[in-house]
Image: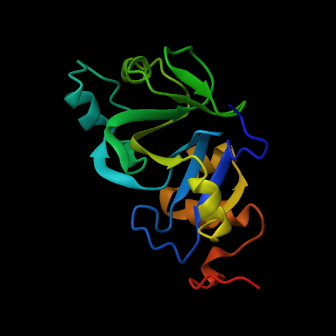
Amino acid sequence: MEIKDSLCNQLLIAMPGMSDPNFNSTVTLICEHNTEGALGIVINRPLDMQLGGLFEQLAIAEPDVSLAGHPVLNGGPVATERGFVLHNPGPEFESSVSVSPDVQLTLSRDVIDAMAEGSGPEKSLVALGYAGWESGQLEAEMLANAWLTVPAESDVIFDVPFADRWRVAANIIGIDISQISPDAGHA
């Protein structure tokens, strides 16, 4: 069930005082947010794994070598053995959710197979794991100043270098995040 002020298609930017090491200096795309909770994919934490290694683990014969060097991301601390693919619209896949007109989230293996064959989406980001919040948890974290939210932009998701995404995402609304104190407070 949708909620009135859904954060779907928003980027959650971890505030400098974020104490949870899973989210320190992260940018997370919220893909679903409803009365049951929220699901997001961290988009700026590359793992020590590349798509070539993932293709190998999945026993994909003769994958597209142009993708082999692309990093796999740590999408969050939940279900780290599951793959999630953020991509631009294009071919239809079994289990896709539209996050926005520019971004889809696919949970089925067929998108990885299509990518390996060279017929996958034009832009994509592969992550292992996701960030999840129970009902009301994300809202409480927002009230505690743990996160800054900005409207998602597909270039931040797919094109900005990983190391720059935290700063660039905050800059969407004119904030220099490096100038924010890690000590949160309320006036």
**From this viewpoint, is residue 98 visible?**
yes
Left or right of 19? Residue 105 is right
- Residue 132 percent across, percent down from the top left: 48, 47
- Could you say which is closer to the camera, residue 181 or residue 79? 79
| In this view, 145 is above or below 31 | below
- Could you say which is closer to the camera, residue 137 or residue 128? 137
- The image quadrant where one finds the N terminus is top right
Question: Based on the displayed image, in which of its 4 quarters is residue 111 positioned?
Answer: top left
- Residue 62 percent across, percent down from the top left: 25, 19
Q: Which residue is drawn at 77% across and 64% down?
A: 173
> What is the basis of the colouring in this image?
rainbow
Question: Based on the displayed image, in which of its 4 quarters is residue 144 positioned?
Answer: bottom right
| In this view, 140 is above or below 96 | below
Left or right of 184? Residue 42 is left
- Residue 148 percent across, percent down from the top left: 67, 64
Q: Which residue is drawn at 56% across and 83% down?
A: 182
Left or right of 71? Residue 87 is right
Q: Please count the marks in the image.
A: 0
- Residue 89 percent across, percent down from the top left: 63, 24
| In this view, 162 is above or below 176 | above
Q: Residue at x 69, y 75 (%)?
A: 176
| In this view, 86 is above or below 21 | above
- The image quadrant where one finds the C terminus is bottom right
**From this viewpoint, is residue 67 visible?**
no
